[in-house]
Image (tube, rainbow, N blue to C red):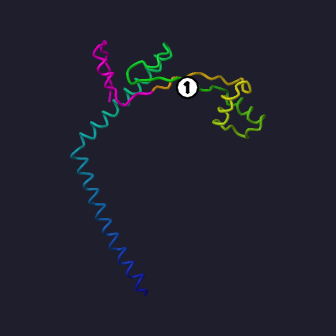
Amino acid sequence: MNPSVVAIARELHVARANLATAKRLVETVEENTRLSYGPLYAERETAKAVVDRLDAMLRGLAAESFRATQDAEPAPGVTVKAESVPYYDAHAALAFARTTGIALMLDVKAFEKVAALSPQAVDFVRFVPEPKVSVARDLSEAESLSAQLTPITTEVAP
């Protein structure tokens, strides 16, 4: 037997045992934490669901408002920018790419760049402005203004 190999094997055995003990301790602590703070974790998940729902609702309403009024700042901390989004038939785009030698398969990003730079070359593409809504992290100004407005209900199911 090789003494060096035996020594390292012994050390590895001890290290594995130490790791198994540490894993069991961590699992115990994690389980105790889940049991002790379960309601707090649930509250966090509920709060996150409400925030996600209200954020989506705000973005949708801001985009709808922008489409109707072109108002780029429908509320404090909420801005809307119109981004030009191309709409086209993918088959026509692929045919264009093949006839011009751009590619054997459509590289969407490259095609859309060409379409934006040379619209006359790809007359089947139309660019439509789509609202892109940005919501500031700090909406405290909106909170102070909301006291002046008619309240709305925002019943949000968790």
Q: Which residue is drawn at 64% across and 35% down?
A: 108
Verify whether residue 89 appears in magenta: no
Q: Which residue is drawn at 28% across and 57% down?
A: 26
Q: Position of residue 118 (x, y in %)?
A: 71, 28
Which quadrant is the C terminus positioned in?
Answer: top left
Q: Where is residue 136 in the image (x, y as percent from the top left)?
A: 39, 29
Q: What residue type is labelled 1?
A: Glu
- The stretch of residues the image draws in magenta is 134-158
Residue 104 or 68: which is nearer the viewer?
68
Residue corresponding to mark 1: 83
Task: Give the prevailing secondary structure in the magenta stretch.
Answer: loop
Verify whether residue 150 appears in magenta: yes
Q: Is residue 8 above or below residue 18?
A: below
Please tell me in which quadrant of the rendered image residue 86 appears: top right
Q: Residue furthest right?
A: 99
Mark 1 secondary-structure assignment: strand
Which quadrant is the N terminus positioned in?
Answer: bottom left
Q: Which residue lies furthest to the bottom in this view?
A: 1
Please tell me in which quadrant of the rendered image residue 151 appears: top left
Density class for disc 1 (Cα within 10 Å; few <14, some 14-19, many ≥20) is: few
Please give the count of numbered marks on the rendered protein: 1
- 59 to the left or right of 14: right
Q: Is residue 9 above or below residue 87?
A: below
Q: Where is residue 119 in the image (x, y as percent from the top left)?
A: 70, 25
Q: Residue at x 73, y 40 (%)?
A: 103
Q: Position of residue 71 (x, y in %)?
A: 47, 16
Residue 129 or 2: which is nearer the viewer?
129
